[in-house]
Image (cartoon, rainbow, N blue to C red):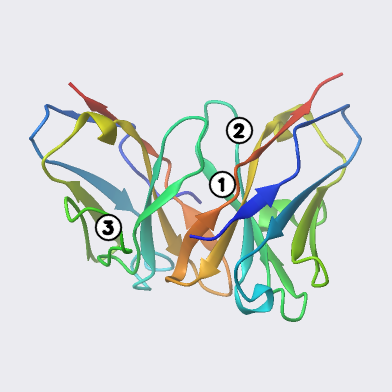
Amino acid sequence: SALTQPPSASGSPGQSLTISCTGTPRDVGGYYYVSWYQHHPGKAPKILIYEVSKRPSGVPDRFSGSKSGSTASLTVSGLQAEDEADYYCSSYAGDNNYVFGTGTKVTVL
Amino acid sequence: QVPLVQSGADVKKPGASVKVSCEASGYAFPSYYMHWVRQAPGQGLEWMGLINPADGSTTLAQRFQGRVSITRDTSTSTVHMEVISLRAEDTAVYYCARSGYYSEAFDSWGQGTLVTVSS
C-alpha cells in the first residue's frame, strides 16, 4: 500500500515547509532506505534525499530529510519559485520490494 | 546521473500487449538494478518491479505479477518491460530508473514513455 503524504503544501518564498510520509514498520519504520524525489510535470523525477537524510551531490542543502518511527519528513528551507513541483517519498519494503508515497503538490505563493 | 533512453510513445488497443525499452549507457550495466515505475494521468508514482541485470532475476509488485515481465539484453545494455492484456487503466507514463549508486534510491531516470490504451 502506498505511503501516505499530504496532497498539498504551500509557502511563500523564503519560508520553510515540511512534508510528511507515513508508512508502516514493514517499510518506512523498518529500514533507513527512505528517499525523496522532486517531479516537475513532463520531466523525469529527480532524487533529492536518500537513506533518510543524505543529499546526493548537486542537491542544495535547503532540502533535508529525517525520520521518526514509521514517518519520514522532507523539509524545504528558503522556498524558491522553482521548488514548485510534486514531491514523492519512497521506501524499501523488504524482499526487493519498494513503495512510493501518494505525492504532495507544493505551491510557492 | 547516467543516461537512460527509453523507447517512444505507443498506442495500443485493450487486450493487446506493449513492450517498452530502456537503454543504459555510461556505467557497468550488470552492476545496478533497474526498476520500472509508472504514473497514470492525475495519479502518483507507482513502483512496478525490478530486474537484476547481472543474472536476469526479477521482482514484481504483487499487483503486476502475471501481467508484467521484465527482461534484459546485456549485449545492448537494454532493459525491456512488457505488459500483456492491456486495459484502459494501464494508460500511463512508464519510467525506468536505476538504483544502487545511492543504495536503495532511484538515482537516474529515463525520460518516460507514454503508453495509451484506447479502443
Residue found farthest to the left = A14
Pointers 1 and 3 in contact (C-beta within 8 Å): no
Residue B46, labelled with which disc?
Answer: 1
Q: Amino acid at mark 1?
A: Glu
- Quadrant location, the C terminus of chain A: top left
Residue A68 is situated, as x and y percent measured from the top left of the image, at: 21, 64
Q: Is residue A8 above or below residue B46?
A: above
Left or right of B20 on screen, residue A93: left
**Mark 1 surroundings within 10 Å by alpha-carbon count, few (fewer than 14), some (14 through 19), many (20 or more):** many
Q: How far apart in space, not on screen, are marks 2 and 1 (Cα)?
A: 9 Å
Q: Residue at x 27, y 57 (%)?
A: A71
The numbered mark, 2 or 1, whose residue comes first in the sequence reads 2
- Residue to which mark 2 is pinned: B40
Residue A18 is situated, as x and y percent measured from the top left of the image, at: 18, 44
Closer mark to the observer between disc 1 and disc 3: 1
Q: How far apart in space, not on screen, are marks 1 and 3 (Cα)?
A: 19 Å
Left or right of A3 on screen, residue A79: left
For mark 2, name the chain. Answer: B
Label 2: which secondary element: loop
Can marks 2 and 3 be said to lie on one chain?
no
Q: From where the camera sits, is residue A23 visible?
A: no
Q: Amino acid at mark 2?
A: Ala
Q: Is residue B16 above or below residue B60?
A: above
Label 3: which secondary element: strand
- Residue to which mark 3 is pinned: A71
Q: State which quadrant residue A53 falls in.
A: bottom left
Q: Amino acid at mark 3?
A: Thr
Q: Residue at x 75, y 75 (%)?
A: B57
Pointers 2 and 1 in contact (C-beta within 8 Å): yes
Label 1: which secondary element: strand
